[in-house]
Image (cartoon, coloured by chain):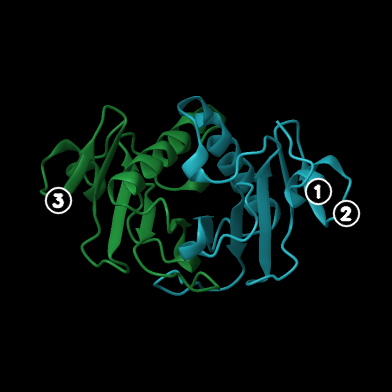
Chain colours: A cyan, B green
Amino acid sequence: MSDSDCLFCRIASGEIPADLVRSDPDAVAFRDINPQAPTHILIIPRKHIPSVADLNDGDSDVMGTLFLMARDLAREEGLTENGYRMVVNAGADAGQTVFHIHLHLLGGRGMGWPPG
Amino acid sequence: MSDSDCLFCRIASGEIPADLVRSDPDAVAFRDINPQAPTHILIIPRKHIPSVADLNDGDSDVMGTLFLMARDLAREEGLTENGYRMVVNAGADAGQTVFHIHLHLLGGRGMGWPPG
């Protein structure tokens, strides 16, 4: 369920400090230490899953929970009216650096296209 | 459930043609007409929900289903080893142009940061 060598598992457990914005039974949210927009929050499941490529068929709720939290945090951050982008990277080509699933919630500025 | 004025509902129903790559009971996938990477697929729920901001608490499965399909299509496209990016835009700041939830699956090249 949790991996003691994983940075994000250790943040979720409270072992490593982070700028937490939400701590729920299934998911945790905290601000990115290298923000790419006025609001840049990472939302992670407590369950250790390295990547979307490692999701099992029974893990449908994992991603659903992250997106419902993104919806709620966007409201709290005042992003709902103007909009926000959500990004999930899987693997090296996408630039994934921590191998524990995380959803980037970005907002507070216009976002360009292509998305990287 | 479906909106007759919505482009993506009309693609899902088959009324408007698209380069379909998957048609399941709950979700449909087709290639973006303005691809931003060698693989650029849009994955949509059949259910008409304008944006992540409009998800209900009971809609957790909606996003979960899209991500399981992304995982499977990434395998089929040969992206799993090198990686892929998944993007969901909500609202104008993010550049959302069709107001029916869609997940962008992008891969086949290195993706930059920030994501737009």
Q: Earlier in the sequence, mark 1 or mark 2?
A: 1
Same subunit: marks 1 and 2: yes
Query: Total of numbered circles in the picture?
Result: 3
The mark lying in front, picked from 3 and 1, is 1
Residue A53 horizontal/vertical position (percent): 47, 43
- On what subunit does the disc labeled 1 rest? A
- What secondary structure is marked by label 2? loop
**Real-space Cα distance between discs 1 and 2?**
6 Å
- On what subunit does the disc labeled 2 rest? A
Dividing the picture into quadrants, the one containing residue B65 is: top left
Q: Residues within 10 Å of mark 1 (few under 14, many from 20)?
A: some
Q: What residue is shown with label 3? A: B18
The one of B77 and B62 positioned closer to us in this rendering: B77
Residue A15 horizontal/vertical position (percent): 89, 46
Dividing the picture into quadrants, the one containing residue B39 is: bottom left
The mark lying in front, picked from 2 and 3, is 2
- Name the residue located 62 percent from the left edge and 61 percent from the top edge: A97
- Amino acid type, label 2: Pro
Residue B68 horizontal/vertical position (percent): 42, 37
- Amino acid type, label 1: Ile
Q: What residue is shown with label 1? A: A11
Residue B67 horizontal/vertical position (percent): 44, 41
- Amino acid type, label 3: Ala
Q: Is residue A29 left or right of residue A87?
A: right
Q: Residues within 10 Å of mark 3 (few under 14, many from 20)?
A: some
Q: Residues within 10 Å of mark 2 (few under 14, many from 20)?
A: few
The one of A33 and A95 positioned closer to us in this rendering: A95
The quarter of the image holding the N terminus of chain A is top right
Q: What residue is shown with label 2? A: A17
